[in-house]
Image (cartoon, rainbow, N blue to C red):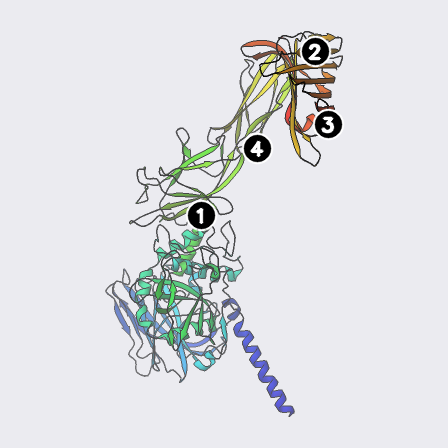
Amino acid sequence: MKTNFILVIGIILLTLSGCKKNESPTGPDNNFVSSKIEVGTSVDVATQSVSTGGGTIKIDKAGDPLNGMEITVEPNSFSSIKNFKVSYAEIKSHSLGDKFNPITPLISISYEGGYSEKPMEVKIPVSLPTGHFAMAFFYDDQTGEVEGLPVEELSSTSITVSTSTFSSASSLSKRSKHDDATSIGKMVISSISESILNAQSIISSGFTLGVDDWEFVNYGSYIAPGGHCAGQSMAAMWYYYEKKLKGETSLFHKLDEVNDKTKPGLLWQDNPLGYRFASTIQKDFNWEGWVKDMEFRSLFPNLVWNAFAYSMFLTGEPQSVLIRNSNGEGGHAMIVHKVNMTEKKLYIADPNYPNNRVANDGSESIRTIDLVNGKFKAYETGLTAGAQSTTMDQIAYFGKTAYINWGQLAVRWAEVLNKTIGNDRFPKYTLWVEDGSGYELADGLNTDADTLIFHCKSTDCIQYLNGTDHYQALEVYNVEGKLICSNNNKGQIILPLASGQNKFGVYIKGARDNSADNYVDFKWINVYRQNLYILPDPLNGKPDEEYEFVARTDGSAPKNAKFIWNFGDASNSVTVNNDSTVKHTFTKEGEFTVIVELYDNATNKKVGAAYSSVNIAKERNLLNLLHTMKTFGVSCSFDFLLPGGSDYSQGISFFKYDNDTLKWNGTSFSYDDADEEDFDSYGYKTNYYHTVSGTVSSDGKTILELKTKYTAVYYSYMEWSETHTEEMNFTNIPIIHYPGYQDWGGEYSNFLYELKEDEAKSHVSFVKWTWEEKDKAPHVNDNIKEFWAPLQVTFRNE
């Protein structure tokens, strides 16, 4: 019993350990650190030249382990003669683990560098154990890494694979150039028991959706209007293998600004470097040639299934899958990142569904290719995310670098980093501001305009908007990813600007070959509308004293700013660079207008202007001057707070600008006015009474106390009457003298002070509004809630 118990526990532990290992995402760096294949002496078996017309290299050596091996090169695969050399070495031992079971020697194939335009086929003799599956792997003897190759045919005596090169991704990544003079590849055939492979539950790579795929949606572009699925998939795999596994940050939302993992359709254009990278890779490689050879392989679904399972099981890496419609309606490229051996599902990273999300609504859509009863179930997807769904009924294993120039992705990534990616393929364009003679719209523009009008012109684009001079379609988005506006029928964007910073994204589109407008570029642009103003404003000063003025903006001034000041007193203008302050001395009395103009020195463009008022006067006895004032006015408007919390608007307005004499007695002033009417034909009349009194300070600069009273009495023949009385007192109101004040063509001396709404209430010392009808109780309001217009007090000498 004790022995049986230990045996059961041992089996359980082995089972749990196996499941945990198989279900854990693994990468090549984890699996193959210091992994090596030890070999014996190298044996040369073939050396042969192949012309541009193609040819077959065949090994015919009885008793040799490679006897019957063939390398077939299609015509026009290379543009020059290639000299092939084939050798092998017996495998003595290896440290790649029990998943790796070599059934051939380590084969070396070399020729002058370069990828073939058409896949080369390599047929290798094997002795396949019963119940085993086998596939070919590139081997890098520097890193110990292996990489699966697409299997064309497999029998008990031979395996046929296809490739466009004989160098693995890991060896290519170490080269200084992707077309080094000699391409040397090492290849080995490894087998595994299908029962062991099928016993796995989940075979997973470390590639994770929403982390390692691109966040944008495959809608195609100007250079790839039919979509860039292959470029998007291969670029993501390359970054994962070459960058992510070596310590760099994840790819998902790495290069954009609007980041919402659940909404791939939200401003999908917001990664121009990544999007142009994907389209450029799509055009760099012969995508049409890749899918041409798929039909034959799709006839063997179990072969394809096992290729995905075994390559991921051995390497721990994601693999590429190509799918196609058998009626010639197009193909699609994706990434297989996980294999469910129990449910027979390949888990897919589809460029049309970033992070397994539907573009238009963000709903989750787990993408799988299913093997049902030994056949692949057709996969439904569009050639692009916006295209009609196509039934893809042919499924093929693509591997990683067998058909593509891995080094070219590194070259293009360098262009991503220096922000030149796609410049050799996408059309050039100019965003042009329509302002006078116009100028190019660039990030950081400063302007004083309240509306920005611009267009996009490209003579490189084959098509353009009707009736325009090569203008292209545009869309403008805000920082939340929402569409603000599109171009009008003249190709213009008309964009209102707020004060300060305005940040918006411009989506540039273009069309060719009678296709719809598609992706050219996307740019974030900051435009600063300068709401320029001068402090102080107004300035009340004295002659022959120096005063400092400061030009302020609501936004940021240009980095290289120029301020030109004019002080309105016939003095010379003053130019100041990169300093918004200036000092000036007025030498005579009067009212002056100070003007400042702001320029961007980088473009010499005027981006703003502001004005301020200056009153220069000598010190004088203002009380004596007040005694010459003939008329007086006071006005304000406010809301009473009524019982129950409701509002009632009221105000006072006493303006005596009809040459009534204002009475002065030292520091005191007053006036009385009455206007009594006769009964009109309807039997009504109204009498009005105004009284104002107050005192000022001895220097004439402050109204210490001001009392106002207005009474209106309404009468009728019916002996009905109603009296409205409005009383309001104020304290400590400053007054300012403005000599030579201009109004209606005349000139006069004027004292004026205006208290803003939030200040006025604190200067009210008493208020009482009374409505009283004959023989009825009066209505009284005496609680001011707030002022909604300034308090103005005026003395004038006319």
In the rendered structure, which disc, 3 or 1, sits on the residue that comes first in sequence? Answer: 1
For marks 4 and 3, give the CA distance.
40 Å
Residue 633, image x, y percentages: 65, 15
Residue 447, image x, y percentages: 49, 32
Compared with 69, 169 (above or below) is above
Mark 3 and mark 2 residues within 8 Å of each other at the beta carbon: no
Mark 4 and mark 2 residues within 8 Å of each other at the beta carbon: no
Instruction: Report which residue position mark 2 lands on.
Output: 672
What amino acid type should be assigned to the residue bearing mark 2? Asp
Instruction: Report which residue position mark 3 lands on.
Output: 782
- The kind of secondary structure element at disc 2 is strand
Instruction: Report which residue position mark 4 lands on.
Output: 554
- The kind of secondary structure element at disc 4 is loop
Residue 180, image x, y percentages: 37, 60
Q: Nearer the viewer, mark 1 or mark 2?
A: 2
For marks 3 and 1, give the CA distance.
70 Å
- Which residue is drawn at the image coordinates 70% and 19% (left, top)? 734
Using the image as rendered, state which of residue 564 and residue 682 is in the foreground.
682
For marks 4 and 2, give the CA distance.
48 Å
The crowding category of the residue bearing disc 1, from other C-alpha atoms within 10 Å (few below 14, some 14 to 19, many at least 20), is few
- The kind of secondary structure element at disc 3 is loop
For marks 1 and 2, give the CA distance.
80 Å
Q: Nearer the viewer, mark 4 or mark 1?
A: 4
For marks 4 and 1, give the CA distance.
32 Å
- The image quadrant where one finds the N terminus is bottom right
Instruction: Report which residue position mark 1 lands on.
Output: 419
Can residue 116 be seen here?
A: no
For marks 3 and 2, give the CA distance.
24 Å
